[in-house]
Amino acid sequence: MTTSAYSLIDPLSPYQALTRHFALVVQMAKRDVTGRYRGSFAGLFWSFFNPLLMLVVYTFVFGVIFRSRWNEQTTSPFQYAMVLFAGLNISSFFSECANRATTLIIENTSFVKRVVFPLETLTWSTVGSGVFHLCVSTIVLLVISPFFMGQLPWTVIFFPIVVACFLPFVAGIVWLLASLGVYLRDLRQVTGIVTMTLMFLAPILYPRTLIPIPYREWLYLNPLTIIVEASQNVLIWGQPPAWGQLGVYVLASGLFAWLAFAWFEQTRKGFADVV
């Protein structure tokens, strides 16, 4: 599909790429997920084992060895690990999509040569694959939460909304990095450093209240902060997300996704000459 298939002045154009080719996106995301575990003995069960194993590791390292506590409400190492896990799930989802984006076009050169193939759907399939692993990790968290936190908060019903607010930004990052990665082959190494930095600068390993007051609001320049705090609120603390913050976040991420999509559609003209 050529660039003329979308009106780049339409803010909804990034989502038209999803709705027009939804079946293709689902098929490619499914292929990506199954291909990752193809040939392994446990197969897709690894998608459940991995987050469960990481939760055990977090509990032992941060809760038992470092004896970390999130706040006065967390009285056991398991509770701190649950809060940590809720934030890291969001960071891992973002990191997975961003790091894969840098080589997304290069690894699919056969599609680049096909004029009729909608390259823009590669972004949505990458995001879809990441959402699958995020959902699996979240299910693990929800199953274990009543045992360590005492209850499963009713506010978990808001978690899909929180994730939906995050998707435009993630898709925009993938479109931007996928196009730049064609021309800048060192981008993968830089992206790995940036995603790790964003993780440490978000309230994942520590609560925002530990940051000195003059610098506390600077955390909101990190695109992960609002989503991480909202996820921890609805999954752990039983509090609804800050709707005002999420509303502003959706508008900003939607604008970013629109601009990134337009950039991708303009730069894709030179992909075939480079790859």
Image: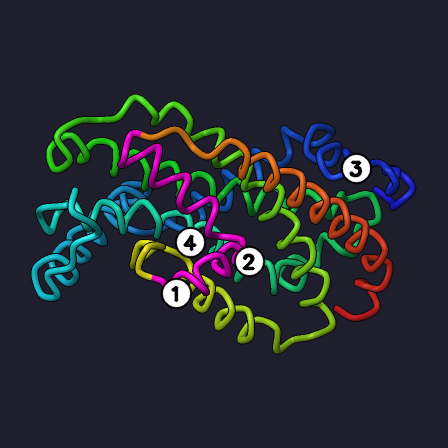
Q: Main secondary structure of the magenta part?
A: helix
| Sequence-wise first label, 2 or 3 | 3
**Residue type (three-letter) at the residue carrying disc 1:** Phe
Q: Residue furthest front?
A: 214
Q: What stretch is highlighted in magenta?
A: 211-238
| Sequence-wise first label, 1 or 3 | 3
- Is the C-beta separation of discs 1 and 3 under 8 Å? no
Marks 2/4: CA distance? 15 Å
- For this view, does 198 lie left or right of residue 269? left
**Residue type (three-letter) at the residue carrying disc 2:** Leu
Q: Mark 3 points at which residue?
A: 11
Q: Mark 2 points at which residue?
A: 221
Instruction: Give whichever of 36, 148 is nearer the camera.
Output: 148
Residue 123, placed above or below residue 60: above
**Residue in view at x 14 percent, y 63 percent:** 61
The crowding category of the residue bearing disc 3, from other C-alpha atoms within 10 Å (few below 14, some 14 to 19, many at least 20), is some
Q: Name the residue under label 1.
A: 200
- State the image coordinates of residue 221 (x, y, percent, origin top left): 55, 58
Marks 1/2: CA distance? 13 Å
